[in-house]
Amino acid sequence: MLCDASARYVIWRAVLDTLPLSVAVIPWGILTGALTIQVGFSPLAAQCMSLLVFAGAAQLSAITLVGGGSSILSIYASGFVISSRHLLYSITFRQHVQHLPLRWRLAIAFVLTDEMFAVSEAHTANTGTFSPSFALASGFSFYLVWNLATLLGIIAGESFGHLESLGLDFAIAATFIAMTFDQVRKMPVAMTMLVSGVLAVFLQPVLPDSYLIFAALAGMVVGYLLDSDVAPT
């Protein structure tokens, strides 16, 4: 299925389309690997975390909580909340993958990230058809880069330490900006981002623990209302 010329083209197209986001996430992966070492993980455990968890934001949250001595329950709860957006991704993908064999659905689910979702949805919008091969190639190419970046971070963390002082965490914001940049041309998306951003700034002093949640919810409500106004009836 993956050996003919058209399939090879789809795979390489997926790798190339994912490449900008893969490059952008390298500092993030290095930071994750280095911080994992700094909180006491062994190099093998640090690498296995990226191999098995494969969720940058959830990994950084877990690393921070482990470093602060938080309970296992807190770590799992934080990971569940941070990763809950994948439920929305799964709902979107369900219509595309429900007819596929179980091994395909499991593989696509494993490599389903923000980056793979954004690239695959853009490909589906451009071609009019969801391609499982494209989604898998995108996801696994990103998986490979993420784990190589983590390995670099592990090596750097053991050699230098305190890499967070280099500002590598900016890669997190840069990656999400890159994923949403193409959608900003749509008014509902632009207003969602604007409302969420402005509210986050103003709410942070008064709600330091929950300002992001309220800002995000307000932005989503505004985006939903605007999208409902422009959607055909």
Image (cartoon, rainbow, N blue to C red):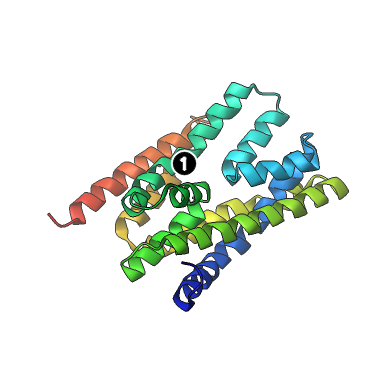
Give the camera-side residue of 2 and 228. 2
Residue type for callout 1: Ala
Regarding residue 168, the answer to whether it shows in the image is no
Q: Which residue occupies 37% across, 52% down?
A: 97
Q: Is residue 190 left or right of residue 24?
A: left
Q: Is residue 106 left or right of residue 34?
A: left
Q: Establish if 138 lies above or below 42.
A: below
Total numbered labels: 1
- Location of the C terminus by quadrant is bottom left
Could you tell me residue 229's position as x and y percent?
A: 19, 52
| Residue behind mark 1 | 200
For the point 15% across and 57% down, the residue is 232
76 on left or right of 216? right
Query: What SS does tag 1 mark?
Result: helix
Q: Measured from the top left, where is residue 218 in percent x and y?
A: 35, 40
Visible residue check, residue 230: yes
How busy is the neighbourhood of tag 1: few (under 14 within 10 Å), some, or many (20 plus)? many
Q: Position of residue 224 (x, y in %)?
A: 28, 46
Of residues 150 and 107, the one drawn nearer to the viewer in this rendering: 107
Residue name at image x 55 percent, y 67 percent? 15
